Image: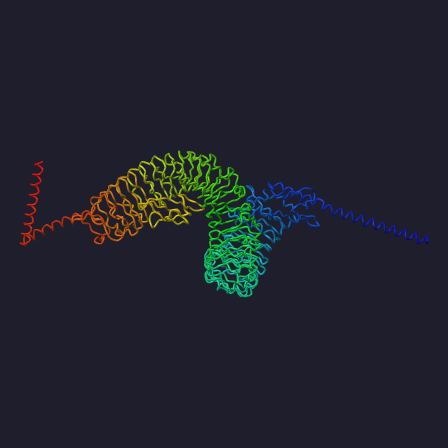
Amino acid sequence: MHPRTTNSSLVLLLILIIDTSLFLTVAALQAEQHGSHRSGCIPAERAALLSFRKGITADPTNRLASWHGRDCCRWRGVRCSNHTGRILELDLGNRNPSTSSVTGCDDVNALFGDISPSLLSLEQLQHLDLSRNCLTSEHQKTIPLFLALMKSLRYLNLSGIPFSGEVPPQLGNLSELQYLDLGSQDQGHRMYSADITWLQHLPLQYLGMSNVNLSQVSNWPHVLNRIPSLRVVDLSSCSVASANQSLPLLNLTKLNKLDLSGNNFDHEIASSWFWKATSLRYLYLGYHRLFGQFHDALENMTSLQVLDLSFGLNQGLVMEGNFKNLCSLEILDLTDNGMSGDIAVLMARLPQCVWDTLQELHLCSNNITGTLPNLIGCFTALTVLDLSKNNLAGNIPPELSNCTHLNTLDLSNNRIVGPLGPEFRSLTGLVTLDLSNNHLSGSVPTELGAFTNLTWLVLSSNNFSGIIMEEHFAALISLKKLDLSSTNLKLSVDTDWIPIFSLEVALFASCQMGPLFPAWLQWQPEITKLDVSSTVLMDKIPDWFWPTFSHAIYIDLSNNQLSGSLPANLADMAFVELNISSNLLSGPIPPLPTNISILDMSSNSFSGTLPSNLGAPQLITLLMYSNKIGGSIPGSLCKLNLLSDLDLSNNLLEGEIPRCFETESSQSIEFLLLGNNSLSGEFPAFLQKCTGLQFLDLAWNNFFGRLPEWIGELTNLQFLRLSHNTFSGNIPAEITNLGYLQYLDLSSNNLSGVIPWHLSSLTAMTLKGSRLLSGTTMGPFPDGDPQFSGEGMFITGQFGEIIPIIMKGQLLRYGRTLAYFINIDLSGNSLTGEIPLDITSLDALINLNLSSNRLTGKIPNKIGALQSLESLDLSENHLSGEIPPNLSNLTSLSYLNLSYNSLSGRIPSGRQLDTLSVDNPSLMYIGNDGLCGPPLQKNCSSGNDTPTDGQNRNNGHELEPLSLYLGLTLGFVVGLWMVFCLLLFMKSWRIAYFRLFDNLYDRVYVFVVVTWATLTRK
């Protein structure tokens, strides 16, 4: 090789090496410089984040656990710029909120603490999400004002943080802001704003202010119209003024979602401004008061996919309008709008172009009638069809089988009839099937057992018959809720059957499952709600039952013939509601479950004493009537501060009510029934604090002493039964302050004195003022009715007591709160004085019993005003005078007892009195020597004659005393002179008169002489 060539090669190689070294050096320097930004972000911003973290007092899900080290850009929730290293995004929103939470402060996954002003150091922060956390405190209840200084923000989400106070208008300084969400679901901590014009300075695309009080903002549509960039607006539950405002030129051409639900707009729906927003795809107007027909502009909303007008409080929406161009419609929700009309007509108004696009149709809770039309089969894209709570009738059309995409079908609470036909066989995608509360009949098809996606199967309250077998559940691997209650179905499976599903809700009330306890339930430990009441079970509760369902919330085993005892560890179980009433259970009562709120153990054979420590601090309703429980009432009852309903009647309890009640007892007691025990002591003093008391039954005990005057302070009292005790003294006059009182029974005590006079104040006993107890019906039930056996109540949100009442001379049993039974029973005491005239104003009275007292005076003449009276018993008193003729005006009267008094005169007749159906009518009047006329055998002489109802037209109105005396005197004088004149001018009458007088004299003379001779001879 030539030397020059070799040297040249070496030079080139040296140059290449030097260039490579320089390149690598520069690259390393650049990498080092860039790494200086990434290795620990910007120190000032890292310090700002650490300062923010110091303000967080609780981080239950460890979201900030990664916040350590120099590189804050790698911390969770933090995103930095790849070029500058500046923090651009801080996302600490709660992505897994609890399903039951309303705000961040009741969410177990939320961050707790304050928002630190150190965030101002994040000068280029564009995205800030702190939603669904609890970032408020005593020092920071409102939105921090310093957030308005973060000028780079484009995204700000503070939703779900329970701020209060005014929304700071300074947020209008965030000139780059495109997304603003201040919404909340919390009604208790509402923010407000009286002026939202500051919003129009922002280039917003998303505005969320749900539940912010905007009631003072009248021009809200005009403000929105000045923000043409808006795409999504959520002003739900903001109390905004009406939407019937005119916007001549609508600038919201990009708006695709508008949520104004929960604002109770009260005007014609056609007058609303939003019908001009033709770009809308989602329109939510639920919980409104809109009425009338849709606007004609509806036909121009061709992009509309979701139209939600559910829960119209005005109940006046009419589904008439031009729907023909709504070809994009996917969801139509008109739930609870009071709509009426035929279902076929309503569905025909939907355009044909949506037959294969409409996915959800909600028409439930309306007044829609007719039969489900065959047209339903054309809506082949339907996934949800909810027609529940209407008045639909007829059969389910077979064309329903074309809706193969259905996952939710709810036809419950209608009047649909017929069997379940083959139309269901093709609906294999169903997830929810609810046909409850109809008149469906026939057997349940086994084809339902092939629906592998079926999660809810609800067939309750129908007329189905036949047997449910294992084939009905063959492939139901997803089943979570099964409700066959109130049908005529019989569940028949092998004793060793193990289901493939895992139920959470199992309801079989009034089905036939017995006589053996269903063994397959032991393989269903996930059940939280179980109802096997009235299922003909005649078995011992198996040992596996209590451990298997120890985590259940609701258990109902009532109205069977189950035997056994309660587990000793009952207190460890999770029950909130437990009903084991009307069975054959026995043994002692253990401490109660900690979380129990409603417990019904009535009508069993439990014995022993109540546990000294009941536990159950959440208890609201405790029913233990009709058992064999003895001993005294434990003092631990005093600690049940939520207790509202307590029924220990018909047991063997004795002693006094614990005095701790006077200082510790719950003032929330509304129903207290302790009747038919051996309890003693004076009238319970703790009741003075229980001003919400509605129902008090202390009958058939050994209570004594005087009734307190403060009983008149219990102004909510509707039922007061103190009979068969030894209460003494007067009936407090204050008892007439009980304006809601409908039932008063003080019978069989030692009460004395007069009946309080101002009975007209008992307005609930009048037709005008009678207030029925809520949500109940009442009437006598025959003995042996399995649903109402026993003499207690089962409260599931309303009262259902069975009360024995002496009425119409016999013992009747009334239930369902005696809501329509108005009663006064003061019998069996030592009451004196007259019957108060005011009692005749109580025209709603059904039963009035004042018998076995010492009442005097007359029966009130206006007794006929008690037009509702069915039973009247005034027997065994000292009443005198005539029976008021207008007693026959009581057209509802079916029982009357006036026996053993001192009544006189002719017994009234006519109308109702002639129709009283008793075997021996005279028994009604026996023991009144002065009475005469039918039905007594004693005839009335002319002197005793009393006008009948047909002769008396005064309707019981008493004559004025002066007029009465003048009339009697004038009549006597005129009659006497008429006799004298006849004798004076008519000779034949005069001769006959004196002859009659002579004959009468002779007879009397002979009778006296003979009688005297006979007596002297003896």
Quarter assignment of residue 807: top left
Residue furthest toward the right?
2
Instruction: Report x, y in % for residue 405.
Output: 57, 59
Instruction: Report x, y in % for residue 195.
Output: 53, 52
Name the residue located 7 percent from the left edge and 45 percent from the top edge. 1003
Pick the residue in front: 794 or 48: 794
Relative vertical location of residue 423 with respect to residue 776 in this rendering, above or below: below
What scheme was used to colour the molecule?
A: rainbow
| Count of residue discs | 0
Quarter assignment of residue 66: top right
Query: Does any portion of residue 266 appear in the rendered image?
Result: no
Instruction: Report x, y in % for residue 24.
Output: 80, 49
Compared across the picture, whether 874 is left or right of 696 comes to left
Query: Does any portion of residue 149 appear in the rendered image?
Result: yes
Pick the residue in front: 606 or 536: 536
Instruction: Report x, y in % for residue 844.
Output: 33, 49
Compared across the picture, whether 992 is left or right of 414 comes to left
